[in-house]
Structure formats: C-alpha cells, structure tokens
Image (cartoon, rainbow, N blue to C red):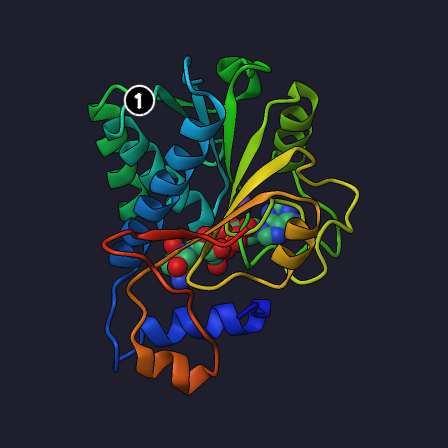
Amino acid sequence: MYISAQKAAQIDALLMGDHYAFSLEQLMELAGLSVAHAAADYIRQQWQHAPPRVVVACGPGNNGGDGLVAARHLHHLGFHTCIWYPSGARSALFTALLTQARALRIGVHHTAEQVALRRCDVVLDAIFGFSFDGAAGVRQPYRRMIESINDSAAPVICVDVPSGWHVERGDVHEVAIRNARALVSLTAPKLCARRFEQRGGAHYVGGRFVPPSLCEALDFDVVRYERERVITRIA
Ligand SMILES: NC(=O)C1=CN([C@@H]2O[C@H](COP(=O)(O)OP(=O)(O)OC[C@H]3O[C@@H](n4cnc5c(N)ncnc54)[C@H](O)[C@@H]3O)[C@@H](O)[C@H]2O)[C@H](O)CC1
Ligand SMILES: [K+]
C-alpha cells in the first residue's frame, strides 16, 4: 500500500491522461475536501472545547493548492482559518482558489509576521508534497516558513508528506517539519508515512475516487472506506 515518489507521480499522470481524463481542478478539490475532513476529525478529537485557529501554510506547487482548497472547506465546517501563501498564485486555477477563499473572508497572508503564529494554533502543512527534492536543502522562503512553524511549537497536520521530509526515507533532512501530529495521505500513503506511524502520529488516507483498473495497472492498493466517508484513519 505504501508507494514511492515515482509511483505517486505516475498515478497522477495516469489520472489526468486520456483514459481517465480527470482535470487537475477535480483532483485538487477531491484532495482538499478529504484533507479538510481528516483535519476536522483530528482537531475535534484533540480540542473538544475551544477549536483552535487553523493556519494553512501553502507551498508553491499542487500540495499548496490542496491547502487552499482545504482552507475553504474547513471554513464551511466551522473552523476559523487563515492562509499563509508566500508565493502567490501562479496560474488561473490558483487565482480562482484565492478569490474563493477571500470571498469567505479567509485572510490570505504572505509573511510570518502577518500570520503571527501562536502555540495555540494548529498548522495545516501544505508546503511540499511528493515532488519535494531535498538534496540541496530547502530554498527560501520555505526554509524560513518551516523554521517558524517549528519555533512556534504549534501542532502540525501534514498534507500528503510532512514538509521537508524525504518522500521515501522520512525525517532525514536538516530543515523539516518537526511537530507533525497527524498526516493525511492522498490516494495512497508514500513510503515516508511508515516512519511517521512509527512515531505514533495519527494517519488518515483520503481520495475515494481511484478507479480499480488504475490500481491494477500500477499495482497498488487503496484503503477501505466505511459507509459514505471520504477519509479513513489507519493509525
Ligand atoms: N493524487 C492526488 O490525490 C493528488 C494530489 N495532489 C497534490 O499534489 C502534490 C504534488 O504536487 P506537485 O506540484 O507535483 O509538487 P509539490 O507541491 O510537492 O512541490 C513542488 C513545488 O515545490 C518546489 N520545491 C521542490 N523542492 C524544493 C526545495 N528543496 N526547496 C524549495 N522549493 C522546492 C518546486 O519547485 C515546486 O514549485 C501531492 O503531494 C498532493 O498533495 C494534487 O492536488 C493532485 C491530485
Ligand atoms: K505537506
């Protein structure tokens, strides 16, 4: 069930290829919806009385896009949410996601100072996913972003991969998210999720839309989902 970075990229390419014809918009919406449901489930178990502010930290790629979608769904689920997005939108899709968030009065910030992260916040880490390459370290402004999340000691819920972790080998780099409490794997857990589970973190999987023929073609399994749920907790 645990897959390599290469297989994760192959799954995405096949989903968006001629045979299955999903659009990136569709996949991101499904991913972000699953992330919001998993984050809400985790937060409601941990903070029964005073739900925290959720700071959604978004990186420059599609993992960041999942974060932008999740921020909107978390708002609809009743959470106080803000977005931390240093790169700004780089395509019409991301511009639309920001417009949708702003229309809900979700704050969109560029710097750590504007976000003013506090220990009582929860961070949704959507900085890097399965395309992270840590061989030459983390480039700015994301190095600073990860360091200030670590300095805040706020608990972190990670989208697909804890940012800065090696997608397969886990927490082996100098700059990486340290206070990861929960992980939401998308479609199938990446190999680093094994290390995450060994540390006792809560592990959810989302993405209840993958055609069985695609699993067969690429030789991987998906988790079982109960009733009408879009996420399942596996650890
Ligand atoms: N199948 C699904 O369920 C879907 C999952 N999705 C999410 O997409 C990400 C993968 O997205 P991708 O755009 O390929 O890459 P990332 O977001 O992981 O990051 C690429 C981004 O980061 C920059 N970068 C890479 N290494 C570094 C570094 N060392 N320092 C600084 N910056 C770095 C790179 O230049 C790019 O800009 C997956 O994990 C899911 O979360 C999709 O939503 C589609 C469906
Ligand atoms: K992440």
- In the rendering, at what x and y percent does residue 201 appear? 61, 43
List x then y, in percent, for residue 189.
52, 61
Identify which residue, 156 or 46, lies in the foreground.
46
Label 1: element kind: loop
Residue 12, horizontal then vertical, whole percent = 40, 68
- Placement of 129 over or under 177, stated as above or below: below
For the point 52% across and 74% down, which residue is it? 7
In this orientation, does residue 89 appear?
no
Q: Amino acid at mark 1?
A: Ile
Q: Pointer 1: what residue?
A: 106
What x and y, as percent, mark residue 32? 34, 46
Q: Is residue 201 above or below residue 211?
A: above
Measured along the vertical axis of the image, is residue 154 above or below residue 203? above
Residue 154 image-quadrant placement: top right
Q: Which residue is at 47% across, 64% downward?
A: 188
Q: Residues within 10 Å of mark 1 (few under 14, many from 20)?
A: some
Ligand 2 picture quarter: top right
Q: Nearer the viewer, residue 142 or 121?
A: 121
Mark yes or no: residue 219 visible.
yes
Q: Residue at x 26, y 80 (%)?
A: 18
Residue placed furthest toward the bottom: 217
